[in-house]
Image (cartoon, rainbow, N blue to C red):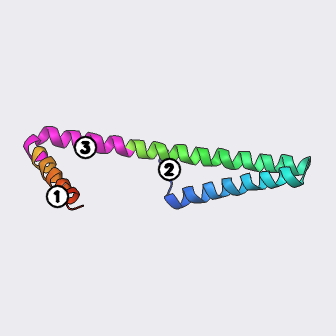
Amino acid sequence: MSYEVTNEQLREHFKDALADAEALVKATAELGGDGLAEARTRARESLRLARARLTEAQDVVVQKAHGAANATDAYVRDSPWEAIGIAAGVGVLVGVLLARR
């Protein structure tokens, strides 16, 4: 399943989960019985959904990181001197930027 979750979707899921958690807190202070059970059920479902979305997003990020690492490894193996030159250039650039602070 190649389901990608955007940052906005994650924010919405967590916002919903937090809203349901806040409702649970209010319900425990104001209600008893059915109201409390309903708020707990909604909070559990929202947290389960948020956790599932976060896990899916994490899986996508891990897959992309593995792909990037494999591509980098292949490039370095095919062109080692170019990779050394690029690394040296980036090192010099970072050194110059840090020295300006």
Amino acid type, mark 1: Val
Q: Is residue 51 above or below residue 94?
A: above
Distance from the alpha carbon under mark 1 to that under mark 3? 28 Å
Name the residue that disc number 1 marks: 96
Q: Quadrant of the C terminus?
A: bottom left
Amino acid type, mark 3: Ala
Q: Which residues are magenta?
A: 64-83
Q: For mark 3, does the 10 Å Cα neighbourhood hold few (<14), some (14 to 19), or many (20 or more) residues?
A: few
Amino acid type, mark 2: Tyr
- State the image coordinates of residue 42 (x, y, percent, origin top left): 76, 50
**Side of 72 relative to 86 (left or right):** right
Distance from the alpha carbon under mark 2 to that under mark 1? 41 Å
Distance from the alpha carbon under mark 3 to that under mark 2? 22 Å
**Side of 37 relative to 77 (left or right):** right
Name the residue that disc number 2 marks: 3
Decide whether residue 72 is among the magenta residues: yes
**Side of 3 relative to 88 (left or right):** right
Residue at coordinates 67% horizontally, 57% vertically from top-left?
A: 16
